[in-house]
């Protein structure tokens, strides 16, 4: 099955029916391993046990940006290649991305209180992630506001690509400005600054959350395809009703004119 | 496994993550059931796709 074959929604539905159970099983297994490793990871010499929040905060923070990246690629698919599933992918990803971003903000806040002494600080990293969260909500509102999916898709694609400018700002905010948030410690020049005992559970949790996203995204795309089928069938049903009532009115008018003659 | 003096922050973080993930999964599952039910109702009332296939048909 090639990428072009997947442009056919029916073939895509067949693929999701086959792969979703396997993806769900792999996600559960990896999450179990990651949670076990996170539970038994040693305490940090400065942060103590609060370092365990990292295993849940960092994967969500990565995914908050990754999902917007996926939506940006899908938006290019909508605007440039007009791929039939591109806007389905973008629309289905938005609520999932919003949930991951919300969790990144919430767990970051809960980690910040004992470590920084505050739940929130208007520094560049925290503020740019909050803006990302608001952009997710804005996109979801846009999809709901426009009734015709193809018209909504173009507007949402433009907004998504403009919003993608925020991704490098989030990533490099800790380098460009003096922030309360620590600089990058995993993906940085010169390798990770984390010890293996923290790095391994973190990477397992990151892969598990990425698989969770892929699973949820495919399932949400399947739902969106079905929703569009419902919409087109309802429109077909409405046009049939309108046609038959017009036909009925026409024959009544004909009978009335015959009677008058 | 001792979570130290900030156990409530750690437990709340994991509980919130679990809750949000469960809500996401529940929403997606319920949405699927809802769409599939609406498609079955449409098929029962005689509205079908031009291909003649069932709208929920994935093969």
Image: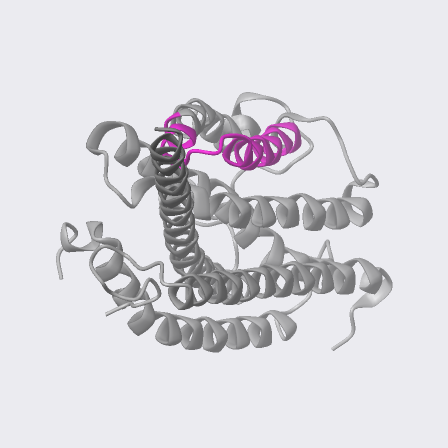
| Foreground pick, A62 / A227 | A227
Q: Is residue A129 magenta?
A: yes
> In the orientation shown, which residue stands out farthest toward the front?
A261
Residue A189 visible within the image: no
Residue at image coords 64%, 33%: A130
Q: Position of residue A128 (x, y in %)?
A: 59, 28
Residue at image coords 74%, 44%: A109
Residue at image coords 59%, 21%: A177
Quadrant for the C terminus of chain A, please: top left
Main secondary structure found in the magenta portion: helix
| Foreground pick, A74 / A107 | A74
Residue B58 visible within the image: yes
Left or right placement of residue A111 versus residue A7 in this view: right
Mark count = 0
Q: How are the colours assigned in the image?
A: one colour
Q: State the image quarter where residue A121 is shown.
A: top right
Q: Position of residue B38 (x, y in %)?
A: 48, 61
> In the orientation shown, which residue stands out farthest toward the right?
B5
Residue at image coords 23%, 54%: B50
Q: Is residue A94 magenta?
A: no
Quadrant for the N terminus of chain A, please: bottom left
Q: Position of residue A229 (x, y in %)?
A: 37, 52
Q: Position of residue A80 (x, y in %)?
A: 23, 28
Magenta residues, as a range? Answer: A126-154
| Foreground pick, A30 / B1 | A30
Vertical arrangement, residue A76 with respect to residue A188, above or below: above
């Amino acid at each position: 099955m090639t990428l072009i074959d997947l442009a056919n929604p029916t073939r895509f539905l067949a693929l999701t029916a086959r792969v979703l159970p396997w993806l769900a099983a792999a996600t559960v297994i990896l999450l179990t391993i990651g949670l076990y490793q996170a539970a038994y990871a040693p305490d940090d010499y400065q942060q103590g046990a609060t370092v365990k929040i990292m295993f849940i905060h960092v994967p969500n923070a990565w995914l908050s940006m990754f999902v917007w990246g996926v939506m940006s690629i899908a938006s290019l698919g909508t605007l440039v290649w007009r791929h039939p599933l591109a806007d389905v992918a973008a629309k289905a990803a938005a609520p999932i991305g919003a949930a991951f971003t919300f969790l990144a903000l919430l767990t970051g806040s809960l980690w910040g209180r004992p470590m920084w002494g505050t739940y929130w600080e208007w520094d560049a990293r925290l503020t740019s992630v909050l803006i990302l969260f608001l952009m997710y909500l804005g996109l979801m509102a846009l999809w709901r506001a426009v009734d015709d999916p193809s018209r909504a898709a173009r507007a949402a694609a433009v907004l998504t690509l403009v919003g993608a400018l925020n991704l490098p700002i989030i990533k490099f905010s800790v380098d460009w400005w003096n922030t309360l948030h620590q600089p990058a410690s995993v993906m940085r020049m010169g390798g990770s600054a984390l010890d293996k005992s923290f790095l391994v559970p973190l990477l397992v949790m990151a892969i598990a959350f990425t698989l969770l996203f892929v699973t949820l995204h495919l399932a949400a795309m399947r739902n969106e395809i079905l929703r569009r089928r419902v919409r087109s069938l309802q429109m077909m049903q409405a046009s049939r009703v309108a046609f038959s009532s017009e036909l009925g009115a026409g024959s009544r008018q004909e009978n009335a004119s015959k009677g008058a003659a | 496994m001792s979570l130290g003096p900030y156990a409530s922050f750690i437990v709340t973080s994991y509980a919130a993550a679990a809750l949000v993930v469960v809500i996401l999964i529940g929403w997606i599952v319920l949405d699927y059931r809802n769409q599939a039910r609406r498609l079955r109702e449409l098929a029962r009332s005689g509205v079908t796709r031009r291909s003649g296939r069932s709208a929920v048909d994935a093969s």
